[in-house]
Amino acid sequence: MLAVEYFGTMSLHVLPTADDLAAAAAARIADAINTTDRTFSLGLAGGGTPAATYRRLAKAEVQWSRVVMWLGDERWVPHDHEESNTRMARSTLVDHVLSAFLAPDTAFGDPEEAAAHYGDALREAFHDGRPDLVLLGMGDDGHTASLFPGTDALAAEGAYLATWVEQKGLWRLTASLPLLASAREIIFLVQGESKAGVLAEIIDDGRPYPAQQVAAGAANVHWMVDEAAASRLRSVPR
């Protein structure tokens, strides 16, 4: 690990490479699961970055029988669609371990109905109504889960919601900002130089991108990033 910086309830972990990032994230998640003695809820991120972490987790010594996995967001597409987060999570992790998995039912009614139904299921699955650990990514526009800058979803109060993302031309289902911020622990995985500018604005300047808003409202946040993503941070010693 190259550097760890602490900012109150937030820590920044800079890893040399994308492989190092995946290994460190998988180890941290496995440790969190293995040190609890009750059912553990693990929120999974979609996108390309987490897949390497999931593949490592699938091979780790983890007490999967106590884990309930769920998705922080999903596209309104069938589960066998190439852009489905459900499909990615199953192929890289879920189908390789003995664990419960709750996925939004994208064949259930319309997006808003499906989101409400999924929110109810999650509330029943969470210990004391809160997720234990949520893994999140960040886009180069500062979005996280399917909370995009300038959208009404950022002000929503429900647990899970449907949001039309104009720039993507697609409905998405997403955990709300309050639900994500209520997690006992959040890990952001950020990889690549294309994220460096926005990451610096969030960490160094506190600019309120959606990812920053989630982090600012949470009690225990770990930013785990590779050197490329950290290349423009003023907070990291060179």
Image: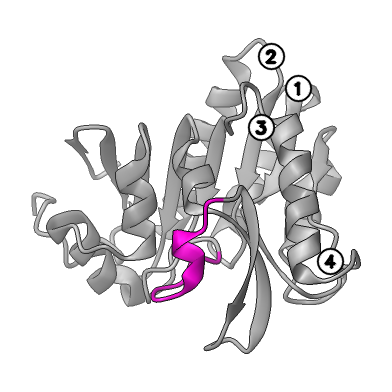
Whether residue 139 is situated above or below residue 64 in the rendered picture? below
Residue in the foreground of this view, choosing between 198 and 164: 164
Whether residue 210 is situated above or below residue 134 in the rendered picture? below
Side (left or right) of 183 relative to 52 = left
Q: CA distance from mark 3 to mark 2?
A: 10 Å
Single out the mark in the foreground, 4 or 2: 4
- Residue 118 at x, y = what percent? 77, 50
- Residue 186 at x, y = what percent? 45, 40
Q: Which residue is mark 4?
A: 106
Say which label, 3 or 1, has the lower sequence index.
Answer: 3
Q: Which residue is mark 1?
A: 66
Residue in the foreground of this view, choosing between 198 and 18: 198
Say which label, 1 or 4, has the lower sequence index.
Answer: 1
Q: Which residue is mark 3?
A: 41
Badge 4: how crowded within 10 Å, few (<14), some, or many (20+)?
A: many
Q: CA distance from mark 1 to mark 4?
A: 26 Å
Instruction: Report the span colored magenta.
Output: 146-157
